[in-house]
Amino acid sequence: MAKEINYQFRLLYAIGISFVVLGHVGNTTFKFMTDWFPWLSFHLGMFAFASGYFFNEQKASRFFSFIGHKARTLLLPLYLWNFAYAALSFILAKAGFSFAGAVSLRSLFLQPLTEGDAFGLNLGSWFLVPLFLCHLYAAAVRKPFSRLCGGTFFSGSIWRCIPFTVAGIALGIAGIEMARHGFRHGWWLVLLRFMYFVPFYECGILYRLHLEKKDTAPSLLYFSLVLGAQLLVIFIAGDAPVCIPGRMDFAQPAVLSLAGGFLGVAFWLRVARILTPVIGRSRVVAVIGGNTFSIMMHQFLGFFCLKTFFALLHKFTPLCASFSWLQYKNDMWYIFFPKNLSQMAVLYYAAAVLLSLAIARVTDAALACARRRFSR
């Protein structure tokens, strides 16, 4: 049977991954509503929300099968790509790039679980472990209740979901406050990243099961309520809350940080619904929204390839005269804009997306070939 496509959430994924990539370029352009909803305050929360939305309670009831599947689709690729980036890091280090991490047993096997970015250019891979833990948590906490309601705890009243949502929000608040008190290193970082993702993940489950069908308010009223609530958050905080989930760095208290995150998700969720009839079935949206894993994983490699192109122009032509060779070789976060034009950020976005899509296509073809060979 053909798989039913949720075009609104596919567009939401495309919007979210675009915010992630552009945010890593430096948020120098494409600033629509970023004074109200900074991308860093919600874009990874939006991915956790969408993952919760697609949480399958029937599959999760077969706990070990469910967790095994998530390990194969999240943790196994994490390690395989970590080995690939280790090889690339070794080559770059030999070429004099200081940001390339050293290859060791720790960086090969332990750091993918803790920091998640042992070799610099694979920085985006850190999100896989907390996302896996969210799947594990959601399935595990519901398992004891699976027999109470005819085999699933999800049928019936919204009040059967509320305790899980409240517990998830409580974990998120606790995790942010622990991070604000310095518990942000080693295995603490693993735990706190997971705790930050959980409230968004649980709200995604709640939204699909009970709230989506009630989400019928006219857009004018909806946006007025969301923007009014965010204005109150901004007034109390003194600015729109911003965080860096990868480092669990939060400028504002947990309640304000989570409120800003939830409101950012709510805002773009409705924007995606409005735009779905217009561009939701676009092939571009389908390709970007359907390959967020690859884009998240390989975006920094795309940036690096574009900077290498600028480096060659700098070396062999009069173009890109202000390019810094020193920063290029020593600072992974160095972003060069020709003529210092912030609009050039779109080139980094295109490089990250196109290279990631190319890698996804090659790996998908290789996997398909391997399946055909082993199925004979």
Image: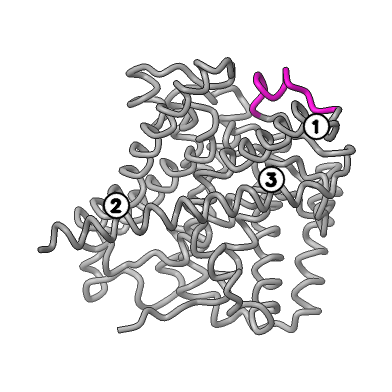
Residue denoted by label 2: 140
What distance separates the C-alpha of mark 1 from that of mark 3? 37 Å
**Element type at marker 3?**
helix
Q: From this view, report whether residue 43 is shown above or below residue 125.
A: below
**Labels 2, 3: front one:** 3
Location of residue 82 in the rendering, given as x and y in whole percent from the top left corner: 40, 33
Q: Amino acid at mark 1?
A: Thr
What distance separates the C-alpha of mark 2 from that of mark 3? 29 Å
Residue denoted by label 3: 40
Q: From this view, report whether residue 11 is shown above or below residue 330.
A: below
Residue denoted by label 1: 317
Q: Residue at x 46, y 41 (%)?
A: 194
Q: Quadrant of the C terminus?
A: bottom left
Q: Within the magenta stretch, is there residue 217?
A: no
Circle 1 crowding by C-alpha within 10 Å: few under 14, some 14–19, many from 20:
few
Q: Residue at x 58, y 50 (%)?
A: 44
Q: Earlier in the sequence, mark 1 or mark 2?
A: 2
Q: Residue at x 54, y 28 (%)?
A: 120
Q: From this view, report whether residue 194 is shown above or below residue 68.
A: above
Furthest residue in direction left, as rendered? 376
Q: Residue at x 50, y 44 (%)?
A: 297
Location of residue 144 in the rendering, given as x and y in whole percent from the top left corner: 24, 57
**Labels 1, 2: front one:** 1
**Element type at marker 2?**
helix
Location of residue 215 in the rendering, given as x and y in whole percent from the top left corner: 62, 79
Circle 2 crowding by C-alpha within 10 Å: few under 14, some 14–19, many from 20:
some
Give the magenta range.
Answer: 322-332
Residue toward you, 226 or 323 = 323
**Labels 1, 3: front one:** 1
Q: Amino acid at mark 2?
A: Ala
Left or right side of 297 for 225: right
